[in-house]
Amino acid sequence: MLTSKEYISQLAKDVEPALVFKEGMNFEGWQREAHAKLEELLGLPLPACEFDFQVTGQEETEGYTSISFTFQSEPGYRVPCTLLVPKGVDTPIPGVICLQGHSTGAHISLGKSIFEGDDELIAGGRDFAVRAVKEGFCAIVMEQRYMGVLGARADGQPACLGLTDNAAMGSFLMGRTPIGERVWDIHKLIDVIEAHLTEYIEPSKIICMGNSGGGTATFYASCYDRRICLSMPSCAVCTYDESIMAMMHCPCNCIPGIRKYFNMGDLGGLIAPRPAVIVCGVEDDIFPLAGVEKSYAVMRNTYESIGKGECCRLVKGQGGHQFYPDDAWPVAKKLLESIE
């Protein structure tokens, strides 16, 4: 007798996703149909509103200027952000949206230790914004829903992850999805960049990156918003069958019904032809390498079918569930040079 989990896993093996891109299809037509379905599954769009952009602080450091700000992404909901601008920059330069994973908050991306365990997270290459500045970019850190100050837990742990206080479950009950809400905030942040931050950031050169839950948000945001010129998700892109469906993950990784239409590699075709750097750890035990390689192979085949195979790259870090900046950044910067 099969367990319930075994039955669903077997069902998935026998069901081909319904909106897979296949050779010979009209690519632009497939992208339009796939994007519309993804938007529906994510529970988007959310209600529109004025940004009410507000600068809340500014700090000078040796290497960069730090500007804190908030904005409304939907009526009554404010998103805290921090912009880092490298010293000596007097014209707009490429900007990197940096998304921490399930952690104590966006301060991890800034390399700031506040809670117990933060030092270990930072040491795993997750101080994305600090490294982006060193690589010559502006960087924006955005607090993600149900995490950090938006999770409102005294210990800093993400409110979407707890088994007894999973705040993100309410999103599903309201016909939304936590990952859709995060994608919407990224989408509206790009609107804010275009409206208020072009003094610092070149709007045609917006990169999005993140690890784990931040990599997941990066991936779906890049599928959803074509203004992201280069996508660099880390420890997130894997077949659903071998990751989200196979083991314990935070429910905020789930998009109800998505496996009926896509596997994760299929969705990667929505990023094409824009550059994508898929980063993984060969010893990552929650996004296993075999599933990563299958997803990447599907993405790469899609890119190759439109003559852009060189724009889709896989970077394998020799370790576990973390980011690998020394391996990933050279690949990303080389691809960025190819964007006119």
Image (spheres, rainbow, N blue to C red):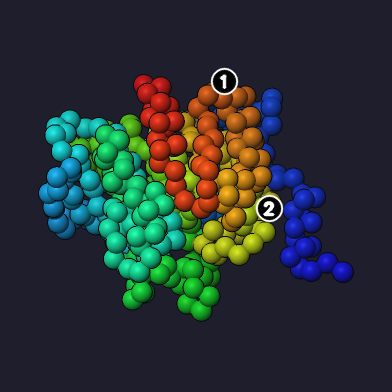
Q: Residue at x 62, y 50 (%)?
A: 288
Give the CA separation, mark 1 to mark 2.
29 Å
Q: Earlier in the sequence, mark 1 or mark 2?
A: 2
Q: Which amino acid does label 1 sit on?
A: Gly
Residue that appears at 47% across and 55% down = 213
Q: Nearer the viewer, residue 219 or 39?
A: 219
Q: Where is residue 85 in the image (x, y as percent from the top left)?
A: 20, 42
User: Is residue 45 in view from this perspective?
Assistant: no
Picture coordinates of residue 239, whole percent (x, y): 64, 48
Residue 111 relative to residue 178: left or right: left
Q: Is residue 65 left or right of 277 when viewed as pictured?
A: left
What's the mark number on residue 116? none
- For mark 1, give the secondary structure: loop
Q: In which quarter of the image is residue 297?
A: top right
- Kind of residue at badge 2: Asp
Could you tell me if residue 209 is visible in this image?
yes
Identify the residue at image location x=53%, y=51%.
320
88 over 224 or under it: above or below: above
Q: Name the residue under label 2.
A: 241
Label 2 Cα crowd, 10 Å radius (few <14 / some 14-19 / many 20+) = some
Side (left or right) of 240 relative to 226: right
Residue visible at 20% across and 39% down in the picture: 86
**Number of other residues with Cα within 10 Å of mark 1, as a class: few under 14, some 14 to 19, many 20 or more:** few
**Where in the figure is residue 123, as x and y percent of width and height?**
37, 53
Give 28 or 313, whichever is nearer the viewer. 313
Which secondary structure, mark 2?
loop
Instruction: Name the residue that disc number 1 marks.
Output: 307
Residue 163 is situated, as x and y percent measured from the top left of the image, at: 53, 75
Query: Above or below — where is 164 with respect to 207?
Result: below
